[in-house]
Amino acid sequence: MSIKDVYQAIVDFDDDAIAGLVEKEIKAGTPAQKILDEGLIAAMDYVGKLFSEGELFVPEMLMAATAMKAGLAVLKPVLAKAGSSTIGVCVIGTVKGDLHDIGKNLVGMMLEGGGFEVYDLGSDVEPAKFVEAAKDKKAQIVGLSALLTTTMPYMEETVAALKEAGLSAKVIIGGAPVTPAYAEKIGAAGYSDDAPGAVELARSLVK
Ligand code: B1M
């Protein structure tokens, strides 16, 4: 029994076994971040590579994502050790047209663990919805995720819509195709390439 079994369960789309395997790793004392990075995320990267090479297709990616979510559900309480007080309010979502929500869920979960009150709007979120929620919840941080080059432009539209509504919330962005240069170009407050980095960034912006 090792972290390789967690990795393999995702690659085999085994959503029945994954929860038990992650639990066993936690009980064995493996750090949650290691299970996440070397088990779950590494396996999803491999699945993505096989998809790019034409070895796997969308239904298989979906099955891998289902297994990943089952594993994440077990890791969540360990990763998100409840922050004792709220250090800020964050509204988060995946932008319009984009259904990828695993990375966004992870970022939301870790922000929660990092002491933020998090409102997750889900995926395929219209710019107007981000504006409405940021206003309603009095958010200091709005987190935007995009995994597709074709949906990245909605990040820019969302930043513009928030500015147009006169909101002062700071926008942080991330997702595989996103870069720091793109964040700067669209007027976002910052970029992170992973979930722990997003927490650090959000914290620095509410100080
Ligand atoms: Co899609 N997909 N997908 N997919 N999918 C990718 C993204 C792709 C890179 C695969 C590939 O070609 N190698 C490719 C995008 C190419 C591009 O545009 N550059 C792709 C494609 C093409 C597509 C479709 C168009 C396929 C099709 O239909 N022909 C389609 C689009 C649907 C849509 O959204 N409209 C599609 C569909 C799907 C599924 C539905 C089957 C499924 C998603 C299920 C779900 O999320 N509920 C899926 C999956 C699973 C993937 C891969 C394999 C895995 C994504 C993932 O969950 N990674 C992916 C290949 C890959 O990335 N390796 C791929 C694990 C996750 C933890 O990482 O999301 O990167 P990630 O999040 C990271 C960081 O990016 C960062 O922190 C996270 C944790 O470290 N981060 C942030 C993310 N958001 C952040 C926000 C922040 C800060 C950091 O601040 C707010």
Image (tube, rainbow, N blue to C red):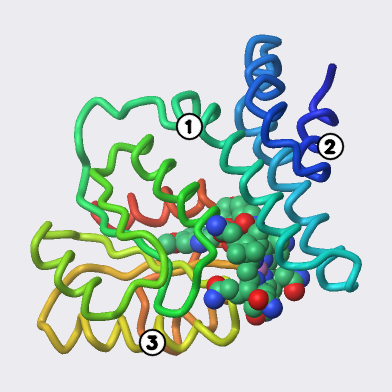
Instruction: Using the numbered discs, state the Cα–Cα distance from disc 1 to disc 3 in whole angstroms.
Output: 30 Å
Q: Name the spot of residue 145 as percent of width and height, x first.
A: 46, 67
Q: Mark number for residue 8?
A: 2
* Residue displayed at 10% across by 67% down: 135
Which element is circle 2 on? helix
Relative placement, left or right, of 193 versus 1 is left
**Amino acid type, label 2:** Gln
Q: Whole-Å distance between the Cαs marked 3 and 2? A: 37 Å
Residue 44 coordinates in the image, percent (x, y): 73, 52
Q: Residue at x 24, y 71 (%)?
A: 130
Q: Residue at x 44, y 83 (%)?
A: 184
Q: Quadrant of residue 52?
A: bottom right
The location of residue 171, given as percent across then percent down, is 32, 70
Find disc 1 in the rendering and name its residue: 76
Asked if the residue at label 3 sits under 8 Å from ligand 1, the reply is no
Mark 2 nearby-residue class (10 Å; few <14, some 14–19, many ≥20): some
Q: In the image, what residue type sits under mark 1? A: Lys
Q: Are marks 3 and 2 in contact (CB under 8 Å)?
A: no
Q: Quadrant of ligand 1?
A: bottom right
Of labels 1 and 2, earlier in sequence is: 2
Q: Which residue is mark 3?
A: 156
Name the front one of labels 3 and 2: 2
Residue 196's place in the image compared with 174, above or below, is: above
Reading the chain from its start, which is encountered first: label 3 or label 2? 2
Amino acid type of the residue that numbered disc 3 sits on in the rendered structure? Glu
